[in-house]
């Protein structure tokens, strides 16, 4: 799994945990739905940290909480 996939999975997991649709998350985060869908579906290869921060704000979590998972802790280095 690469970082892009980990971000996508984490967003879907958080939506499920908070009983939110992707569209609802986009709305409460002030992120265009197309941007969020591109992040989740792989159309966006590099989700910016500002966008992730807005999504975290909408989810009412910190960036630390977003990235503090075993998945992110165990990601392999992508630049070798």
Image (cartoon, rainbow, N blue to C red):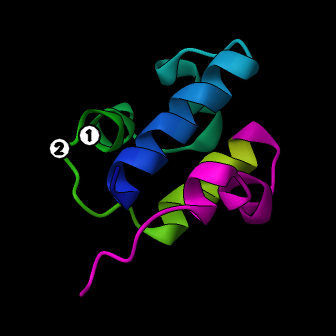
Q: Position of residue 14 (x, y in %)?
A: 66, 30
Residue at (79%, 55%) from the top-left corner?
65
| Label 1 vs 2, first from the N-terminus | 1
Q: Is residue 16 above or below residue 26?
A: above
Residue at (39%, 39%) from the top-left corner?
36
Residue at (47%, 35%) from the top-left corner?
9
The C terminus lies in which quarter of the figure?
A: bottom left
Label number found at residue 68: none
Q: Is residue 3 above or below residue 1?
A: below
Q: Position of residue 22 (x, y in %)?
A: 49, 22
Q: Position of residue 21 (x, y in %)?
A: 55, 14
- Queried whether the magenta region covers residue 39, the answer comes back as no
| Position of residue 44 in the picture relative to residue 49 (left or right) | left
Crowdedness near tag 2: few (<14), some (14–19) or many (≥20) residues, C-alpha within 10 Å: few
Circle 2: element type: loop
Which of the 4 image quadrants contains residue 37?
top left
Frontmost residue, 80 versus 55:
80
- Queried whether the magenta region covers residue 72, the answer comes back as yes
Single out the residue that lies furthest toward the left.
43
| Position of residue 26 in the picture relative to residue 64 (left or right) | left
Q: Which residue is mark 1?
A: 38
| Position of residue 40 in the picture relative to residue 70 (left or right) | left
Which of the 4 image quadrants contains residue 52?
bottom right
Q: CA distance from mark 1 to mark 2?
A: 4 Å
Residue at (72%, 63%) from the top-left corner?
63
Range drawn in magenta: 59-80
* In contact (CB < 8 Å): disc 1 and disc 2: yes
Circle 1: element type: helix
Q: Which residue is mark 2?
A: 43
């Amino acid at each position: 799994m690469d970082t892009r996939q980990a971000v996508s999975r984490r967003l879907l997991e958080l939506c499920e945990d908070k009983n939110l649709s992707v569209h609802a998350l986009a709305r409460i985060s002030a992120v265009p739905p197309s941007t969020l869908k591109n992040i989740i579906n792989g159309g966006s290869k590099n989700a910016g940290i500002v966008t992730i921060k807005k999504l975290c704000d909408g989810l009412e979590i910190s960036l630390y909480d977003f990235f503090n998972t075993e998945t992110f802790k165990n990601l392999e280095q992508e630049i070798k």
